[in-house]
Image (cartoon, helix red, strand yellow):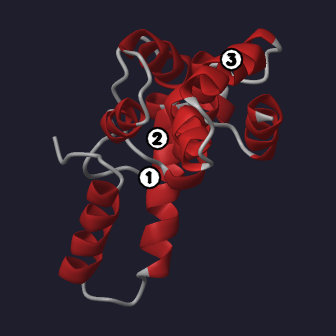
Amino acid sequence: KATNSAAGMVGWKPRSERELRQRLEEKEHDPEAIEAAVTRVQELGMQSDREYAEIFVQSKWRQQRWAPARIRGELMSKGLTAADIDAALQGVFGDDMAISVPREGYDDEDDDEHVTTDTRYDPKHHLIQGVKRQAELSRGLKSDTRKRRLIMWLQRRGHNWD
């Protein structure tokens, strides 16, 4: 019964091992059944913390432009290992996991200078596009207000001003 429940949970949405265990405990399955269920769904390839981390990193970066530090913190709170988190972050952000974009003076003419030729997976390009969208939304506001809103947008996603 616990295995069917676990399979249904991970079939509904990806979950970390810790989340899966917590959900099974909430459904009042006994500890032995939980252990057996988690092991079984992992053997079947239905649950993997490494794959969960990869999906989570890609999703949070592409949809919400979360910074690597914020993503790392969230994955740690979900019980993932540092190795799984690092591998997933490196898959999106590269080995240095740093996103550096120019603070001022960025314009479309300089695109080649700041991003790679394949921008589909370039974090700098996607972050710049997100900032441009936010800037467009605040068009017509005072310069100080626009700047403050852009900074707040970045900070809510875990990016720092450095």
Q: SS for tag 2?
A: helix
Q: SS for tag 1?
A: loop
Q: SS for tag 3?
A: helix
Residue receiving disc 1: 107
**Residue 28 point in image, percent of width and height:** 59, 45
Front-most of 25 and 15?
A: 25
Dot 3 alpha-carbon crowd within 10 angstroms: few under 14, some 14 to 19, many 20 or more: few
Kind of residue at disc 3: Ala
As drawn, 147 above or below 157: below
**Residue 147 point in image, percent of width and height:** 24, 70
Mark 1–mark 3 CB contact (< 8 Å): no
Front-most of 45 and 159?
A: 45
Q: Earlier in the sequence, mark 2 or mark 3?
A: 3
Mark 2–mark 1 CB contact (< 8 Å): yes
- As measured in the structure, the alpha-carbon distance from the residue carrying label 2 to the one carrying label 1 is 6 Å
Dividing the picture into quadrants, the one containing residue 71 is: top left
Kind of residue at disc 1: Asp
Camera-side mark, 2 or 3: 3
Dividing the picture into quadrants, the one containing residue 70 is: top left
**Residue 27 point in image, percent of width and height:** 62, 48
Kind of residue at disc 2: Asp
Mark 2–mark 3 CB contact (< 8 Å): no
**Residue 48 point in image, percent of width and height:** 65, 19
Residue receiving disc 3: 36
Front-most of 101 and 68?
A: 68
Residue 11, numbered circle: none
Say which residue appears at 47% left-offset and 46% top-offset. 127
Quarter of the rendering occupied by the N terminus: top right
Residue 117 in sight: no
